[in-house]
Each structure stands twice: as C-alpha cells, then as structure tokens.
Image: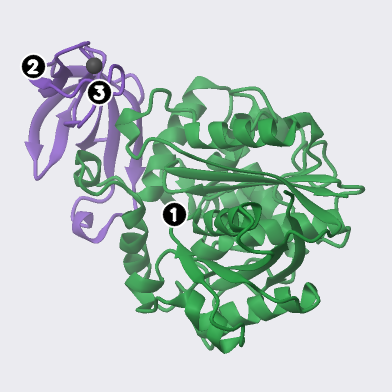
Chain colours: A green, B purple
Amino acid sequence: MNAYIHGVGMTEFGTLEDRTMKDLMLDASVEAIKDAGDPKIDAVFVGNFMGGSVYNQEILGSIISNELGLGYIPTSKSEGACASGGIAFRQGLLGILSGEYDTVLVTGVEMMKHISTSEVTSAINAAMDNDSNEKYAGLTFPGFFGVLANRYLYETDATKEHLAMVALKNRNNAINNPLAQFKKPTSIEEIMNARMITEPLGLFDCSPITDGASAVVISKNESQIKIRATSQASGPTQMQNSEELLSIPAVHESGRLAYEKAGLGPNDVDVVEIHDCFSMTEIISSEELGFFNKREGYLAVENGETMPNGSKPINTSGGLLSKGHPIGATGVSQIYQITKQLRGNAVNQVDGARIGLAQNLGGTGSYSTVHILERV
Amino acid sequence: MIAYQCINCGFQSVTKKYYCPECKGSKYEEVNVSDEGEVFSYTTIHIPPEEFTKYAPYQVVLVQLEDKLRVTGFMEVPVAIGDKVTFKEIREGAYVFSK
Ligand SMILES: [Zn+2]
C-alpha cells in the first residue's frame, strides 16, 4: 500500500501571546483539511511534548475531532521530545499503511512563550535521563551539544565561524519565510559575538523558544506527493554511553532504514529539512544522513553547498534556528516545507525539486525519524 | 572510582544496567577503576538549570579514564581537551573532578 500527502497547514511561529494552544492547533488543522479538499478524516494523531507539564492541557486529539466535527473517530497523542511531531506523522502513516484508515490528520503543536526561560529549560530537561549522574553534574540539553561541538572543533579544522555560517544561512532562509520567528537580517560578526549559552554555542547557535502549530492530511488515495519511506530509530540517552561522541546513531540508523525502504540514496535527495536544534547538530546530522563525509560537513557549509542554490539545500524553511522550534510542531512543519518544495511553491524554492527528506530529532539523540517524499 | 563490570564478558559501565549491551548478561560486580583520566570534551555552561545557578559558569566534562570508561563529571575550574584530571568525590550524585 502507498500513502500520499493531500494537505498541509501551518500557523505563524513565534511569540503568540494572544493565541491559545487550542486555537493554534485548530487553525493549522483546518488549513490542512481545506488544502486537502475537505476529505472525511478517519483518525487524528497529535504531536506534542509539554502541553501537560506547562500548559495543563492534554486530550488534544479529542479536542480537534470535537471542535472540527470529525465525529467519534479515534485520536491520540505522540510524545518523543522534539521528535513528537515526526513520530505523530509516522503513527498516522502506519495507520494508513496497516489498512485501518483511509485518511488521517496529523497535527503538531506547542505553547512555550507564556512561561519563563528557566521554566522552559527545566521542562525541556525532561528530555534527558534525569535519574543519572549526568543530570547531577549540571548537564543541560544545550550543554550536551556544546560538549559535542568542542570535540568536533578539536578533531577537525572547523572553527566557531563554521557554526555561525549555519546560523546565518538559516536566518537568511527565514527572512523569506513569512511564518518564521526570526526575519531580521544578521551577520557573522553579530552571531560570533552573541552571548554564550553553553560554550562554544552562543545565542544564535541555539534554537529559540517558540509557539506554533502545523498540520498535514495523509491518505491512501493518490496525490502528487507520495510518501516513499518512513523510519524511526533510538539512540543513547546518556552522553557517557555513546560509543563515538561525534555521531548521532539514531539519525544514522533512521536515515539508513529510510534509504533502504525507498530504494534511494543521499545523492537522490534534492531538498532537505534537518533537525538543527543547534548549529552543530545540522552539520553532524548532514554527515550521518550521508550527504557529506564524516568530519567534512563543515566544509559543505563553507562552500555554500547547503544553501538553497547549492547542491544539497538544507533547511530552506529557516530551520529550527530561525523558523522557530515549537517542539511538538517542528516535525510536522518539516513535512509542510518539503511538501511545498515538491509542489514548487515553497519559500526559497529549489528548482525542480522532486525528492525531499525530513529528519526530526528527539532528546540528545534519543529518537530520530526520517521521511522521504516524492513528487509523482 | 567504582564501576560495574559484567561478570560474563568484562564490559564496564559507570551506571548499573539490567542487561549487558555486549553479551546480554545480567550479573554485574563492582570493580575499582582508575581515578585518573583526561578531558575528552567539555562545555562551559552559562545558562544553568535553576539548582546550578550558584555554580555558573561551570564545566561539564566528559572524562576518558585510564581504563576504557568514559564518565560525565562536574568541574568548577576551566579546562581544555586533553587536560589531565582526577576524580575527587561524588557530590550530590555528581562525579566531581579536579585538575
Ligand atoms: Zn557482558
């Protein structure tokens, strides 16, 4: 059996103080359903990470089905930290591939701006193994990627400026994206001189705190966007257990599985959304997905290969770094961008894009999903 | 420093595990491992979790012990990759190292 994308929707990402989680997820859902031509929806799959802990709101799927008059259909929520959206999309897809549903709605949502940065930091730390000596050592989520980055800079000829180039590229992409959180131009100097969060990562190397929602309608009925592969993998939950620090095994494994299922390789991919929770993560994951050799991803950035007009455009949406990172919505919004690219009407459109790949990461490498889409 | 070693195959871990990732064995014994090692990588944390505010900025280090093990630890003083460090104590669950 095959599955196809029929509709996509996305709210603005940013500080949406006058909006509620409910109206954001309903807005994105309605846009996706309308875009799909108002089909009958058989089930709803929601991606959300901290609605329960910081917004005191669960039963999100049921709220959507009731508010949109979808009937007494089954709904559920997926949680996989920052991969919640990618996992929800995959669960919806598996529901179709199993033959249980014809058409499903997948909606990702997060509200994060109504609480303080330290409350967000501690809520996000739920995505680490907190019953461990690493938590007691004061390791944070960005801290893990700081340790990774220092080692990468040590083992390669990459410098902090290469990290800044990733942040600048994604900002320049976001400037053209009306739905992105950060649309103000910046410079390598401003990025390099920004205050430190967790060395060597500064403010612009870290994805922001964001409100937003995104939605997708998938069906077994044909459309011009075919889903060629879905995959998911897990990885170490503790830094001290990783066999090779400069790898993210979950990304590598989910990529390998997706290529195998699609019968495609990294060279076949025309446009990519990578989970750039930190500038360093985009480089390492671009290596793990086979786009560049190990320890050489920074050279591709330096040579402009990952820009929209480069040989392997990465994060044409602006990425998490500048489009914004409403945790549960992120994975779904990657599918939104890839679908727009394959339809030929995306921001930072890549000429003739036919195969697109979206990779969504959860935790410090605890989860990764990969989806490969094709224009048919 | 104390670590856990698989009785069957000798795999070591700083944390107790239910199953050995190498041989699937489930019996571990406590062994003494070296307190000496070097910094494999580190970060300096400027934006700490609430309970670490009093230490910031502080270092979280990934230490390669002289034995095979790597352990995540805490250090107050600045470090660089390759620095020799020594395990001092476990303080409130954290492995504290010094130069
Ligand atoms: Zn063993």
Residue A263, image x, y percentages = 75, 31
* Residue ID at (13%, 23%): B3
Q: Name the residue tied to disc 1.
A: A80
Three-letter residue code for mark 2: Asn
* Residue ID at (56%, 88%): A67
Residue B21 visible (yes or no): yes
Q: In the image, which disc is placed on residue B32?
A: 2
The numbered mark, 3 or 2, whose residue comes first in the sequence reads 3
In the picture shown, does residue B68 fall above or below A144?
above
Q: Name the residue tied to disc 3.
A: B20
Asked where in the image residue A88 lies, by quadrant, the reply is bottom right
**Mark 3 near ligand 1 (CB under 8 Å)?**
yes
In the picture shown, does residue B8 fall above or below A349?
above
Residue A372, image x, y percentages = 71, 44
Q: CA distance from mark 1 to mark 3?
A: 25 Å
Q: In the image, which disc is placed on residue A332?
A: none
Residue A326 visible (yes or no): no
Query: Mark 1 against mark 2, which lies toward the viewer?
Result: 1
Q: CA distance from mark 1 to mark 2?
A: 37 Å
Same chain under badges 1 and 3? The reply is no
Q: Tag 3, which chain?
A: B
